[in-house]
Image (cartoon, rainbow, N blue to C red):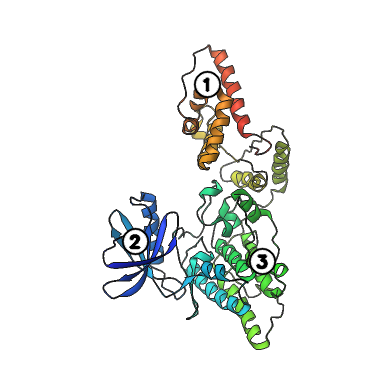
């Protein structure tokens, strides 16, 4: 049992991969608390930094709809985050205990409080990035709803997401916005929270989430490309107005979602008032009073339709087995990267790998610098995959390279992390050496450029 000076620990209320959450008592004033600790006896610097980050973000958020953070306590080699305990349980626990979806009035009362809390978070220039039922705490008797867990929240008004293996995403994949997956060629801003809230509303109303499955890539593709059944299609008792509110939150493009939490709250209050006064909710078009509280410029490509079409049709040909190369040139800042990144979406559908390298005027003395950069990117993507998948890649790469793996490691050093140390290769003449390299390099690329996962 943990011993945190000044606190009595009670039951474990949540057990995660990296964290344990206890109910506890603060000894000096007998105040009930929630205590969030790390599971590891000797946590990594990154794990400690995340807990500190959560404290720093949430400590300055004083609002009724946010779980208060009291302090960050040191004990042994670790830290404990001390939060308020207002007698609530997570929305996830509530939904799991139900045999049917939430009653409409209960849904609206919770939804209005969530919209208000999210509005406060966004006014404080914070993006939560992990809105989901597990991070929503409800005291049903006092009718209080609060948002918690700011461990991956951001103070930036906008941030770029990197392409990583879906198994290493920050956040929860089932509730993640399309842009948060890194496959949409769009940066992340506060609109990402509206999408995650939309998934949460969808689950509250229907008992289902729109994107589910065991395969992370399938879930990513579902978020960015699949059209969902509306809540009303799954549950005919849901009024059309509420169904459309949820679908507006779930728009694939951020600019098509609600632009402010206040606009969402007005629509939800309209529904609740109609339900209370007339016993039914008449149809209205959502978002009529929605006005953005922040200046946002749509993240669309303009005037590049022909180039995008060329890229996407080239990718389709490559997916059928052709080999092609496309070079994009232009002055710095003209939008080359934004154009190239439009190919992310079909790559997810084909389970492909996307790698990129950029020719840099300051690296003109390094042969093949852009190609090496692209292949190093590929190795990093492979290293983020599961141990089982990594074993498969090791077997395939070693079968392709045989005893000559060191030749490719000399060019891409990180490959050694996958296939291990390789025996030295025989010295041969310059022409023969070049031919050997070309042959091995082609065999190496062929491992990844397959119909089942084009490169």
Residue 365, visible in the rendered structure:
no
* Residue under the image location 47 percent in, 64 percent down: 126
Q: Residue at x 30, y 71 (%)?
A: 26
N-terminal of the pair, mark 3 or mark 2, is 2
Would you say 441 lies left or right of 6 here? right
User: Do the numbered discs 1 and 2 sit on residues whose CB atoms are within 8 Å?
Assistant: no
| Secondary element at image label 1 | helix
Which residue has dot 1 on it? 403
Badge 2 element: strand
Give neighbour class at mark 2: few <14, some 14-19, many 20+ (Cα, 10 Å). many
**Is 379 in front, or is 83?**
83
- Nearer the camera: disc 3 or disc 2: 2
Point 33% across, 52% down: residue = 41
Read off the residue under disc 2: 80
Residue identifier under label 3: 247
Point out the image quarter for the C terminus: top right
Seen from the viewer's position, the closer of residues 372 and 361 is 372
| Residue 257 position in % (x across, y down) | 63, 65
């Amino acid at each position: 049992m943990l011993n945190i000076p000044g606190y009595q620990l009670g039951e474990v209320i949540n057990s995660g991969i990296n964290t344990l959450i206890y109910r506890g008592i603060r000894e000096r004033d007998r105040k009930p608390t929630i205590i969030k600790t790390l599971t590891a006896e000797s946590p990594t610097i990154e794990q400690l930094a995340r807990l500190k980050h959560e404290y720093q973000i949430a400590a300055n958020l004083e609002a009724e709809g946010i779980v208060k953070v009291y302090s960050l306590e040191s004990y042994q080699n670790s830290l404990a985050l001390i939060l308020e305990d207002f007698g609530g349980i997570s929305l996830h626990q509530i939904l799991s205990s139900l045999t049917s979806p939430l009653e409409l009035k209960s849904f609206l009362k919770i939804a209005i409080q969530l919209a208000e809390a999210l509005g406060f978070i966004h006014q404080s220039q914070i993006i939560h990035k992990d809105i989901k039922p597990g991070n929503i705490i409800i005291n049903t008797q006092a009718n209080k709803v609060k948002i918690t867990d700011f461990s991956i929240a951001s103070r930036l008004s906008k941030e770029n997401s990197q392409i990583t293996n879906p198994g290493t995403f920050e956040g929860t994949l089932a509730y993640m916005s399309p842009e948060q997956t890194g496959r949409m060629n769009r940066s992340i801003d506060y609109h990402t929270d509206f999408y995650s809230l939309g998934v949460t509303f969808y689950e509250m109303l229907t008992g289902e989430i729109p994107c589910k499955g065991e395969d992370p890539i399938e879930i990513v593709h579902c978020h960015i490309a699949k059209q969902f059944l509306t809540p009303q299609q799954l549950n005919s008792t849901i009024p059309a107005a509420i169904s459309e509110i949820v679908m507006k939150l779930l728009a694939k493009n951020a600019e098509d979602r609600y632009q402010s939490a206040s606009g969402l709250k007005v629509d939800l209050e309209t529904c609740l008032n109609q339900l209370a006064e007339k016993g039914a909710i008449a149809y209205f078009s959502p978002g009529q009073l929605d006005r953005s509280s922040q200046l946002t410029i749509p993240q669309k490509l303009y005037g590049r339709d022909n180039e995008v079409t060329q890229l996407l049709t080239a990718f389709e040909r490559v997916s059928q087995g052709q080999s092609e190369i496309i070079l994009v040139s232009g002055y710095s800042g003209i939008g080359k990267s934004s154009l190239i990144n439009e190919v992310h979406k079909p790559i997810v559908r084909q389970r492909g790998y996307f790698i990129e390298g950029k020719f840099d005027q300051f690296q003109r003395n390094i042969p093949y610098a852009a190609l090496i950069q692209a292949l190093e990117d590929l190795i990093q993507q492979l290293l983020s995959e599961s141990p089982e998948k990594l074993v498969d890649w090791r077997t395939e790469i070693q079968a392709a390279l045989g005893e000559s793996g060191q030749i490719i490691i000399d060019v891409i050093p990180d490959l050694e992390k996958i296939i291990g140390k390789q025996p030295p290769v025989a010295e041969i003449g310059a022409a023969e050496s070049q031919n050997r390299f070309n042959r091995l390099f082609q065999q190496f690329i062929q491992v990844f450029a397959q119909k089942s996962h084009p490169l």
